[in-house]
Amino acid sequence: MKGLIGNSLLVVGTALSGIGGANAQRASRALAIEDVPVTGEVLFGDVTDDSGGVLLAAGTDLDVGAIEELKAAGIESVLVRVPPRDTETVSATDTEATLGRSISAALPVSEDVTIPAGKFIDEKVAQQIIESGAETVDVNVVREFSLADWDGKTLFLAGILAMVAGIVIKRGNREDAAADGPGATSGPAQMRARLQEMSKTVAGLAGRTEGMDAESIHEELTPLFSEYGQPFVDDRHVLSGAFGAGRYAAIMGPFSSAERRLNRAWSAAVDGALEEARLQVGAAVPYLEESLAAFPKG
């Protein structure tokens, strides 16, 4: 039960932190018209009037005229781009403005050499630009991170906390299993039984693949990982505690080889590579049998 809770928390935490992290940088922000400076802001999307007509189009600079037009239409706030522009033009000789940036458009510096777009400007590249005689250079604008504007920070933090809790619970569960010894629910006896069932299932599948299509092989392989493979890997510490490092290696070595071949079979089945899927399922069988044989008798 603890293992299920721990796994669930890890899944939920990963999802939440992923969603939160995806919103770490916003492409736009709301700005009250009264707060708009005279220059520097650019509309993110079209601004429409009450009839649905486009008052100002996306990409419009919010100059004095645009601001007055918005005020006259009763518009109180707009969405502006973050950053206002993707690129900017800076002096080629101003290394404070160029170093650490990347070039946004290809720049010829000689007859034979052109600095490609996206090139990071280090001291060597900056010197090339200066020696080329160029007066200006177009560079990409880096979007600055703002914690205050990060809408997903609560989700991200909740996801991290959920993952930490899941790790703590799973670690506690493993320590309990190891402390309980061979008679525990996840002890060596159950692990051997789980491996024996997995070996039997894979051998049975290998004997039937000639009459199966790729989709059917995929459907039968998928539950093998969740029902046998992953639980066996999760509890592998029990083996080293019960049998020592040598026996642990003798069991887990061939098991890992079998697992890799089953993963290849699963991927091949997904891709529709039927013969490869059949081959890899069959190749996993002797490794599972070797792993099972390495368990101490009795």
Image (spheres, rainbow, N blue to C red):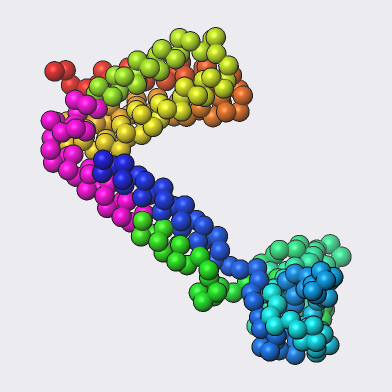
Task: Tell me if residue 63 comes above or below residue 294 in the rendering.
Answer: below
* x and y, in percent, of residue 248 in the image: 24, 31
* Residue under the image location 16 percent in, 17 percent down: 297
* x and y, in percent, of residue 274 in the image: 59, 19
Res 139 visible? no
Asked if the magenta segment contains residue 167, the reply would be yes
Asked if the magenta segment contains residue 176, the reply would be yes
Magenta segment boundaries in residue numbering? 163-191
Identify the residue at the far front of this view. Answer: 51
Front position in the image: 208 or 87: 208
Front position in the image: 174 or 15: 15
- Res 240 → quadrant: top left
- Res 64 → quadrant: bottom right
Identify the residue at the far right of this view. Answer: 111
* Residue under the image location 38 percent in, 17 percent down: 201
Task: Tell me if residue 169 comes above or below residue 205 in the rendering.
Answer: below
Task: Tell me if residue 18 comes above or below residue 234 in the rendering.
Answer: below
* Residue under the image location 71 percent in, 63 percent down: 118
Q: Left of 98 or right of it: where is 298?
A: left
Location of the C terminus by quadrant is top left
Dominant secondary structure of the residues highlighted in magenta in the image: helix
Location of the N terminus by quadrant is top left
- Res 38 → quadrant: bottom right
* x and y, in percent, of residue 131 in the image: 78, 77
* Residue under the image location 45 percent in, 62 percent down: 155
Task: Tell me if residue 135 comes above or below residue 241 in the rendering.
Answer: below
